[in-house]
Image: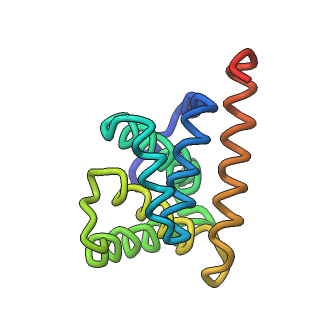
Amino acid sequence: MPENTVTEPLAPMDPDDITGAFAYIRALQAGDVDTAGAVANLCDGAELRQVLLEVFAHIVIPVTAVDDRDGESCAHAFLAAALGQLLLDTLNYADGACLAFPPGIAQTIIRFTETILTDDHGDVADVLRQLEAAGMKQAMEAHPTTA
């Protein structure tokens, strides 16, 4: 099994980036394209794309990191198969959105949350709120004067 490449925690994000990214993601998840468009218009597409990719990294990397110190798969080794299936599903059902741009990235975050982070495709919006709160807490600790 390959050595775990996650050696250092990801740097905390800026609180404003977290707020904007999750506003965009939640709007798309709720099917509110007008709000998603309004949020996207507040920043340029390249910036939103980068922030969404950073959010995705903060969600995916901690969840999929495999501890293989003993050379054995850890209890969460099933995540590799589930993540692979999720990426295949995303590529197959991207709803016409290019995965390299904000709508596709946000839809991938939503699908990852639904598929991997909720029980039986539970309340995705609630899990997104929890992820936002965790990111905001980390960001505020790293940037205490930003508030």
- Residue 4's x, y, as percent? 47, 45
Residue at position x 58%, y 28% in the image? 14
Residue at position x 52%, y 68% in the image? 29
Counting labels gives: 0
Q: Toward which corner of the image does residue 87 lie, by quadrant?
A: bottom left
Question: What residue occupies the far bottom of the structure in this picture?
Answer: 120
- Residue 47's x, y, as percent? 37, 34
Residue at position x 73%, y 15% in the image? 145
Q: Quadrant of the C terminus?
A: top right
- Position of residue 122 relative to residue 73, above or below, is below
Question: What residue occupies the far top of the structure in this picture?
Answer: 145
Residue at position x 36%, y 43% in the image? 49
In the picture, measured across the screen, residue 99 lies left or right of residue 19, that is left
- Colour scheme shown: rainbow
Viewer-nearest residue: 70 or 124: 124
- Residue 23's x, y, as percent? 57, 51
Viewer-nearest residue: 57 or 38: 38
- Position of residue 95 relative to residue 38, above or below, is below
In the picture, measured across the screen, residue 26 lies left or right of residue 126, that is left
- Position of residue 34 relative to residue 21, above or below, is below
Q: Quadrant of the N terminus?
A: bottom left
Q: Toward which corner of the image does residue 93 lie, by quadrant?
A: bottom left
In the picture, measured across the screen, residue 2 lies left or right of residue 121, that is left
